[in-house]
């Protein structure tokens, strides 16, 4: 940021500085588990759109998946959702998997050395679930389909993972009342946007505190 701010520019140029942000997804696992096969595939496809666009490096792309339910619900969701997402990625995702694999392995090695993760679920490295230690913040990410996962008993347990770095929270399976409670819990602590899974990358003229049309266009 400091480097670019020093570059020559016209006197009337406007700098719009966007912070380094990441995003989360949260699933009510019991609701997902009760879906039929077609609806499970549709939900995983919506998540794929959020996550794998821009190789998961967009500020609104989820880097962590939080599972809310009891132990059996969360365990079943994690396996079935992983399998669904892997099938979609195998069919749709075209990338240099070898280069991305090295980034993920380096990230996992650093996380393990710092005791940030306690387990890994991975196939050919297009989809990697790493199990996040309790109340460990997500800071550095590799992108390309590496997700931190954390099992929670209730939406209230999301609070320790919320901070000003988090931009978007994508949600699935929660009632309006439950998401209203979530908004009250996180108010002032972080997260700018709360949207259904599949809508994380929907753009708006107001973004990260900027009125983009007014900032980027001469409307006089």
Image (cartoon, helix red, strand yellow):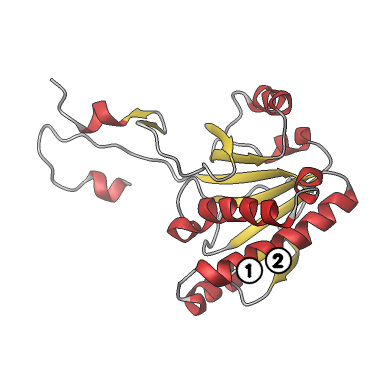
Mark 2 falls on what kind of element? helix
Q: Quadrant of residue 189?
A: top right
Disc 1 crowd, CA 10 A, few/some/many (<14, 14-19, 20+): some
Disc 2 crowd, CA 10 A, few/some/many (<14, 14-19, 20+): some
**Would you place residue 162 above or below residue 112 in this image?**
above
Instruction: Identify residue for label 1.
Output: 87
Q: Residue furthest left?
A: 10
Residue at figure coordinates x 62%, y 77% from the top left: 124
Left or right: where does residue 207 sit relative to residue 108?
left
Residue at figure coordinates x 26%, y 29% from the top left: 213
Residue 136 place in picture, x, y as percent = 70, 49
Residue 16 place in picture, x, y as percent = 29, 37
Residue at figure coordinates x 59%, y 24% from the top left: 188
Q: Quadrant of residue 216?
A: top left
Position of the C terminus, as image quadrant, is top left
Instruction: Identify residue for label 2.
Output: 83
2 and 1 marks in contact (CB < 8 Å)? yes
Query: 23 or 43: nearer the eye?
Result: 43
**Would you place residue 131 above or below residue 203 in this image?**
below
**Would you place residue 20 above or below residue 192 in this image?**
below
Residue 153 place in picture, x, y as percent = 84, 41
Q: Is residue 208 visible?
A: yes
Q: Is residue 110 visible?
A: no
């Amino acid at each position: 940021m400091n480097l670019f701010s020093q570059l020559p520019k016209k006197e009337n140029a406007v700098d719009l500085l966007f912070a380094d942000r990441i995003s989360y997804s949260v699933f009510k696992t019991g609701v997902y588990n009760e879906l039929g096969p077609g609806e499970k595939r549709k939900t995983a496809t919506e998540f794929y759109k959020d996550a794998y666009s821009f190789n998961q490096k967009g500020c609104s792309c989820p880097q962590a998946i939080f599972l809310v339910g009891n132990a059996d619900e969360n365990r079943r969701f994690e396996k079935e959702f992983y399998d669904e997402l892997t099938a979609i990625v195998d069919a749709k995702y075209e990338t240099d998997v070898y280069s991305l694999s090295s980034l993920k392995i380096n990230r996992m090695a650093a996380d393990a050395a710092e005791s940030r993760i306690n387990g890994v679920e991975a196939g050919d490295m297009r989809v990697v679930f790493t199990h996040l230690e309790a109340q460990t913040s997500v800071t550095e990410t590799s992108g390309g389909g590496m997700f931190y996962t954390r099992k929670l008993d209730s939406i209230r347990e999301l609070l320790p993972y919320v901070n000003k770095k988090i931009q978007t929270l994508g949600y699935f399976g929660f009632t309006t009342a439950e998401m209203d409670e979530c908004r009250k819990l996180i108010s002032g602590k972080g997260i700018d946007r709360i949207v259904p899974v599949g809508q994380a990358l929907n753009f708006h003229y107001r973004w990260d505190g900027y009125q983009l049309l007014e900032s980027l266009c001469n409307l006089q």
